[in-house]
Amino acid sequence: MSPGQIAALVAAGAFVLLVLLLAIPLLKLGRTLDEATIAIRKAHENSDPLFDGANTTLTHVNTQLERVDGITANARAVSGNVSALTSLFTATLGGPLVKAAAFSYGVSKALRARRKRTAAMEPTGRHSRRITRKSGKR
């Protein structure tokens, strides 16, 4: 054997070793891709019940939201009616009620002023005599 043939055999052996060393990661990568494919397939199969459950949940939520919309519409109508009733009460009884309150305040103020005036005219003390209305004497 010539040195060229020996060099060719060594190069061929090195190339086979290189192919074997590269084949191992390629095989592992192939297994990983197979597992990923299986996982994706299982996720796809299990996603149908999940989407069906989500769809059912959304249907129930929409039903409840429609009920809440009805309740808020009724509450809006009730608040409008209460506002109208308050306006009516204020218009019909508010004015006379304010006048009655002002009148009672004026009467009470006049009575206090009269009491003060009467108290200022009477002598104070324990032994003072009272003025009688008929005679005006003590």
Image (cartoon, rainbow, N blue to C red):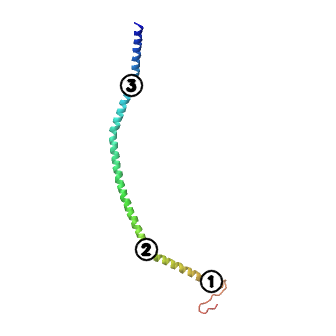
In the picture, the quarter occupied by the N terminus is top left
- In the picture provided, is 91 more to the left or to the right than 53? right
Q: Secondary structure at mark 2?
A: helix
Q: Residue at x 37, y 30 (%)?
A: 33
User: Gap between marks 2 and 1, in whole Å?
Assistant: 43 Å
- In the picture provided, is 104 more to the left or to the right than 75? right
Q: Quadrant of residue 116?
A: bottom right
- Which mark, residue 26? 3
Image coordinates of residue 28 in percent, x first then y, are 39, 26
Which residue corresponds to mark 2?
Answer: 91
Q: Would you place residue 30 above or below residue 107 in this image?
A: above
Image coordinates of residue 124 in percent, x first then y, are 66, 83
Image coordinates of residue 122 in percent, x first then y, are 64, 85
| Structural crowding at the residue carrying mark 1, measured as other residues with C-alpha within 10 Å and reported as few (<14), some (14–19) or many (≥20) | few
Q: Are marks 2 and 1 in contact (CB under 8 Å)?
A: no
- In the picture provided, is 109 more to the left or to the right than 59? right
* Dot 3 amino acid type: Leu
* Dot 2 amino acid type: Ala
Q: Residue at x 61, y 83 (%)?
A: 117
Q: Nearer the viewer, residue 76 or 12?
A: 12
Q: Secondary structure at mark 3?
A: helix
Which residue corresponds to mark 1?
Answer: 119
Q: Nearer the viewer, residue 83 or 63?
A: 83
User: Gap between marks 1 and 3, in whole Å?
Assistant: 118 Å
| Structural crowding at the residue carrying mark 3, measured as other residues with C-alpha within 10 Å and reported as few (<14), some (14–19) or many (≥20) | few
Q: Residue at x 37, y 61 (%)?
A: 73
- Residue that extends furthest to the bottom in the rendered view of this protein: 135
| Structural crowding at the residue carrying mark 2, measured as other residues with C-alpha within 10 Å and reported as few (<14), some (14–19) or many (≥20) | few
Q: Nearer the viewer, residue 4 or 23?
A: 4
